Image (cartoon, rainbow, N blue to C red):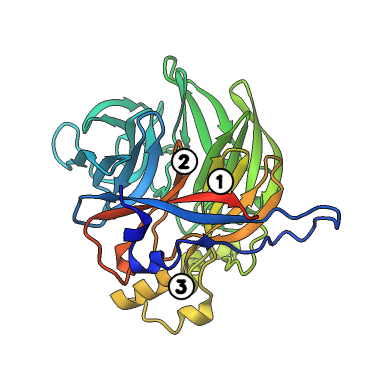
Amino acid sequence: MKSLLSLSKPFALATTILSLVSCNSENSESEKPVELALVLSDSIQVDFLGEMRLQDYDPASDQYLLVSDQAQKYLEVDAQGKISQEVELSSDGLDAVSTVLGYSYVDGKVIVLSAEKGYLKFEAGKKVDEVLIPYPFSAFMFYPKLDFFEMRNKVMYPYLWPDSKVIDFESGDFYQSMYREPIMQVLDLASKDTLGTMYLPASSPLRDGKVHGFPIPIVSKKGDNWLLGMWLEPRFYVYAQEGDQFSYQKTVELEVPDWVGYKPVEPAAAATFFDEVRKIRAATFEDLLILDDYVLAIYRKGVAEQKLATIDQQSPEGRIEIERMNPYYVAVFDKDYKLLQADLALPPGVHGPTVVNKNGELVTSKNPSLSQVEDEGLILYKMKLVKKE
């Protein structure tokens, strides 16, 4: 395991506290605001040449899942950085996977969402099972963080669009239908019945009759609650599970300053939505993590149109500069979903996603394209969330 003294230069300068003063100013004078900090504590070096990013973590096996940008290759890495599996998914043969739309890690098995076959399970690099969706479907959304859960003889996963329903990316009605359909679905593996679904609440901005793009979910479980966020929205929804059903309880706002949000368009202008979004680098809500009694929201604030217009987005140098201008932050909520602090900065030059390991450390991967110092192999950075004295 690599010590802090051998971290790359930009991070060696930041091995003390990475924090901002709490942005929550609603405490009364008799209450002392909670002030938190992220502390770089250690790193893991993986002996692998090539660019991969941390995707998920499995606490049962204490292993990290890393994937390539092309999504056809993945590594399984232990806590010391030793590679236990190096797998390249084949686009030919009986177990061919030609288009990967997301990865997850469940009970030591790698979950792969295939556009053609649905949810596939791999163990030791071999396909061992698959979740058969009980209807013909079309999978057209990429899931940067695929949330797949096992619950005894049931599974919950992002809802896949039935072939029986129309797909028209230039139709406002198509998007309205997506926002009314389930976001997550529960499947009984024995009966193949869909037993429960998680819908956006009627109060969600995505249900306002306008076009908001694709509803890409971010999901976590906290005790008896399920938390649902949307990729482009600065908020999450809390649900209570009752049997196999999910009942909406409340909405929690991130309250992030300088959030560069997209502008929804009217249904008649649905075909222009993505053209408008490309004028900015929209802020993104990328993960919900549970750390002890805290809920952590991982996000990027985006890049405004005025700044983006000054950069050549088609050049490699321009794309790297945009990434540098759009770092990752953490907002921390208490067990009752009260915002304690926003804008805790992750180290500069890292990839998303971020995970929490079994030792209560946040772990993220270095983005070598953004680093000013070349390191051999892949590097995972560990951080602790601490209260400032």
Which of the two residues, 11 or 326, is positioned nearer the viewer here? 11
Residue depicted at 57% across the width and 68% down the height: 260
Q: Identify the disc placed on residue 177.
A: 1
Q: Quadrant of residue 342?
A: bottom right
Give the crowd class for mark 2: few <14, some 14-19, many >=20 residues within 10 Å: few
Per the model, the C-alpha gap separating discs 2 and 1 is 9 Å
Per the model, the C-alpha gap separating discs 2 and 3 is 40 Å
Give the crowd class for mark 3: few <14, some 14-19, many >=20 residues within 10 Å: some
Compared to residue 247, the image places residue 86 above or below, namely below
Marks 2/1 in contact by CB < 8 Å: the verdict is yes
Which of the two residues, 178 or 221, is positioned nearer the viewer here? 221
Identify the residue under disc 2: 165
- Badge 1 element: helix
In the displayed structure image, the side of residue 260 where residue 115 appears, left or right: left
Q: Quadrant of residue 239?
A: top right
Residue depicted at 23% across the width and 55% down the height: 377
Q: Identify the disc placed on residue 31.
A: none
- Badge 2 element: loop
Compared to residue 134, the image places residue 2 above or below, namely below
Q: Amino acid at mark 3?
A: Met
* Residue 213 x %, y %: 51, 57
Q: Amino acid at mark 1?
A: Ser
Residue 278 seen by the camera: yes
* Residue 25 x %, y %: 77, 61
Q: Which sits earlier in the primary sequence, circle 2 or circle 1? A: 2
Identify the residue under disc 3: 325
Count how many numbered circles sit on residues in the image.
3
Q: Amino acid at mark 2?
A: Lys
Q: Which marked residue is nearer to the observer: mark 1 or mark 3?
A: 3
Per the model, the C-alpha gap separating discs 1 and 3 is 35 Å
- Badge 3 element: loop
